[in-house]
Image (spheres, rainbow, N blue to C red):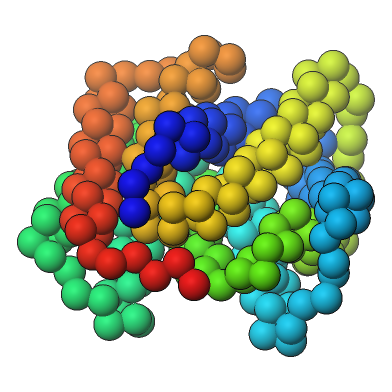
């Protein structure tokens, strides 16, 4: 299976949108309660996705197994992963959250070895070690510089939830109802977030142009468009090859945060990002040589 130009454009576009979501969130949580903000975001995105799906003729009939997978995916990716990250970004910078989230391909490879019996090659092991070393390098420096440990822990909980959600993607959209599947998963995440927000977060919302712009961008681009591109990319080239584009996320994440919200960027951060990216690339290259099951 070869990656064509369209797949490469889709992959880079996804990485840019996915990475920019952290900066948009960092801006938005300064003006609104994070869980309420995210719950409304997914409510709007989910409804838009279902309307688009209907207009394009998609049906909403899913098997019991698919419904379970879609709901769990929505809760773990949209609810737990993004919920913990939005809360964390009240205390830590967007580039740090993006760097921690970039561990996803490494964790997926590790989970495949631990729970699915996948064998790890020497290249994969080297990549896992390199990625872990890069993250630890940044973590030690950031914590010594005063980063909130609670925010860091929340981001690690989030990326663990995202790992589980990623393992659910395979097979969810095999009947072609990509947009409706995305819509239902967003509504599932929204429902979970509204419950969490009601139980554990006081509501506050201060209207401002930065909030309107960042919220609108999160709904339409970082949320709906990025998720749709990801699902179509997985269907087009398979989950392993699609995950290769995640190695761009650490770089895009820190650059976008530095440009748009003027977050600090040290040489140690850059070196750590390079090491993480190389680790992710090693893991994905080692997996590309294996047969890919896209069913």
In depth, the one of 41 and 68 nearer the eye is: 68
Vertical relation: 149 (above or below) 8: below
Q: Is residue 147 visible?
A: no
Vertical relation: 162 (above or below) 26: below
Q: Is residue 24 visible?
A: yes
Q: Is residue 122 left or right of residue 148?
A: left
Q: Is residue 23 left or right of residue 176?
A: left
In depth, the one of 222 and 202 nearer the eye is: 222
Of all residues shown, which one is farthest toward the bottom?
Answer: 64
Image quadrant assignment for residue 144? top left
Where is residue 188 shown, x and y percent of the image? Answer: 78, 66
* Residue at the image point whose x is 75% and y is 54% from the top: 179
* Residue at the image point whose x is 91% and y is 25% from the top: 207
In depth, the one of 71 and 95 nearer the eye is: 71
Q: Quadrant of the N terminus?
A: bottom left
Where is residue 69 shown, x and y percent of the image? Answer: 65, 76
Where is residue 223 shown, x and y percent of the image? Answer: 70, 42
Count of labels in the image: 0
Vertical relation: 224 (above or below) 19: below
* Residue at the image point whose x is 91% and y is 49% from the top: 55
* Residue at the image point whose x is 37% and y is 58% from the top: 240
In depth, the one of 222 and 81 nearer the eye is: 222
Where is residue 24 shown, x and y percent of the image? Answer: 66, 29
Image quadrant assignment for residue 71? bottom right
Q: Is residue 140 left or right of residue 162?
A: left
């Amino acid at each position: 299976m070869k990656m064509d130009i369209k797949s490469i454009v889709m992959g880079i576009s996804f990485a840019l949108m996915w990475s920019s979501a952290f900066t948009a969130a960092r801006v938005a949580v300064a003006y609104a309660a994070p869980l309420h903000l995210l719950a409304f975001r997914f409510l709007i995105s989910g409804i838009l996705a279902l309307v688009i799906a209907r207009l394009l003729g998609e049906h909403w009939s899913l098997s019991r197994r698919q419904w379970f997978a879609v709901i769990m995916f929505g809760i773990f990716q949209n609810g737990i992963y993004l919920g913990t990250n939005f809360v964390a970004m009240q205390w830590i910078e967007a580039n740090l959250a993006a760097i921690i989230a970039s561990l996803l391909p490494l964790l997926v490879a590790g989970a495949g070895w631990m729970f699915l019996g996948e064998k790890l090659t020497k290249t994969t092991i080297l990549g896992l070690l390199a990625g872990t070393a890069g993250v630890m390098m940044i973590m030690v420096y950031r914590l010594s510089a005063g980063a909130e440990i609670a925010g860091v822990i929340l981001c690690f909980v989030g990326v663990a939830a995202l790992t589980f959600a990623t393992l659910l993607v395979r097979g969810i959209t095999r009947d072609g109802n990509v947009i409706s599947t995305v819509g239902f998963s967003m509504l599932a995440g929204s429902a979970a977030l509204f419950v969490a927000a009601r139980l554990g977060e006081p509501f506050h919302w201060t209207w401002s142009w930065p909030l309107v712009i960042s919220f609108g961008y999160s709904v339409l681009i970082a949320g709906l468009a990025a998720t749709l591109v990801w699902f179509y990319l997985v269907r087009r080239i398979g989950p392993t090859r699609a995950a290769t584009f995640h190695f761009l996320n650490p770089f895009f994440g820190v650059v976008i945060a530095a440009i748009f919200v003027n977050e600090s960027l040290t040489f140690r951060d850059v070196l750590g990002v390079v090491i993480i990216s190389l680790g992710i690339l090693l893991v994905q290259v080692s997996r590309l040589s294996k047969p890919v099951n896209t069913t």
